Amino acid sequence: MVEIKSQLDPNLRKIISSKKQVAVIPVGSIEQHGPHLPISTDSDIVTKITLSLCQKNNFLMLPTINYGVSYEHSPFFNLSLKKTTLQRILSDLCLSLFENNIKTIFIINGHHGNLNAIKNIDRNLRKISKNKLMVFTFSYWHFMKEEFDHAGFVETSLMLAISNDVKMSLAKKGLITEGMSKKEINNLGKIASKSFPTVTKNGIWGDPRKATKNVGKKIFSEIVENLGKKCQTCLTEHSSKFHQ
């Protein structure tokens, strides 16, 4: 695994020229995560997941894009990019990697509000590069069994596993969807995607109070293992299309 931000130019160019490389771009956000988690939570989690993924699979890791599309959390604190801005940043980075002879890229997303920005970016880049650049986009929560939340049990457990910045004494119960129908939950999700505080006044979806470090470690390992398998499947299935 090579974390490119710490590399010297001659060494990095040698690494790239020695064999075909796979680059990974983590994308997070800066936004409220209740009173007990830092605003960097999404970026922190996706960075650690990507680091572990790259270590296990010998991928090139790019610096995390720490800003995402988080306007839905207003008036809670957020530092947001427009959807088109994030799309442009990711597209420009991928094309820049392509110019440096890196033709296989995974984008690992850590924030739900980024979904529309990364949608179809792989298709657009393949068209621009005439199928010479292969880009795959994944959101890490799709690779675990637990239902994801926001600053709730799952996300707080993950943060306890990777960070010392969690303040459990400040953790409070948020929106609880237990007992609701799928339709009701989906409707709340649609509202939350436009105005998160409308559905949960304290900015929490779920209940973080029983979150533990051990649970977080198990979820983290599950995500990295499943995500790694998916990446390797992509590389195998699309190998005939790579680097033409």
Image (tube, helix red, strand yellow):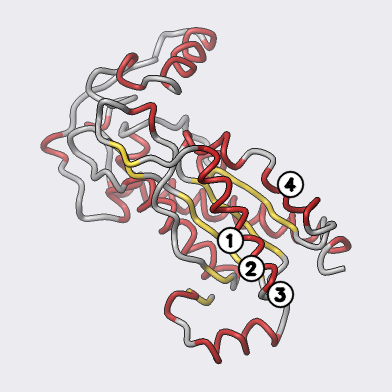
Name the residue carrying label 2.
Answer: 97
The amino acid type of the residue labelled 1 equals: Leu
Residue 165 at x, y percent in the picture: 20, 51
Which residue occupies 83% across, 57% down? 131
Please say if the residues under marks 1 and 2 sit with CB atoms less than 8 Å apart: yes
How dense is the environment of label 1, judged by Cα within 10 Å: few (below 14), some, or many (20 and up)?
A: some
Please say if the residues under marks 3 and 4 sit with CB atoms less than 8 Å apart: no
Name the residue carrying label 1.
Answer: 93
Disc 2 is placed on an element classified as helix
The amino acid type of the residue labelled 2 equals: Leu
Picture disc at residue 124: 4
Which residue occupies 70% across, 64% down? 104
Residue 155 at x, y percent in the picture: 35, 39
Disc 4 is placed on an element classified as helix
Figure check: 195 above or below 37: above
What distance separates the C-alpha of mark 3 from that of mark 2?
6 Å
The image quadrant that residue 60 belongs to is bottom right
User: Could you tell which of marks 1 and 4 lies nearer the N-terminus?
Assistant: 1
Could you say which is closer to the camera, residue 68 or residue 169? 68
Left or right: 2 with respect to 33?
right
Picture disc at residue 101: 3
Figure check: 169 above or below 216: above
How dense is the environment of label 2, judged by Cα within 10 Å: few (below 14), some, or many (20 and up)?
A: some
Quadrant holding the N terminus: bottom right
The amino acid type of the residue labelled 4 equals: Asn
What distance separates the C-alpha of mark 3 from that of mark 1?
13 Å
What distance separates the C-alpha of mark 1 from that of mark 4?
14 Å
How dense is the environment of label 3, judged by Cα within 10 Å: few (below 14), some, or many (20 and up)?
A: some
Disc 1 is placed on an element classified as helix
Please say if the residues under marks 3 and 2 sit with CB atoms less than 8 Å apart: no
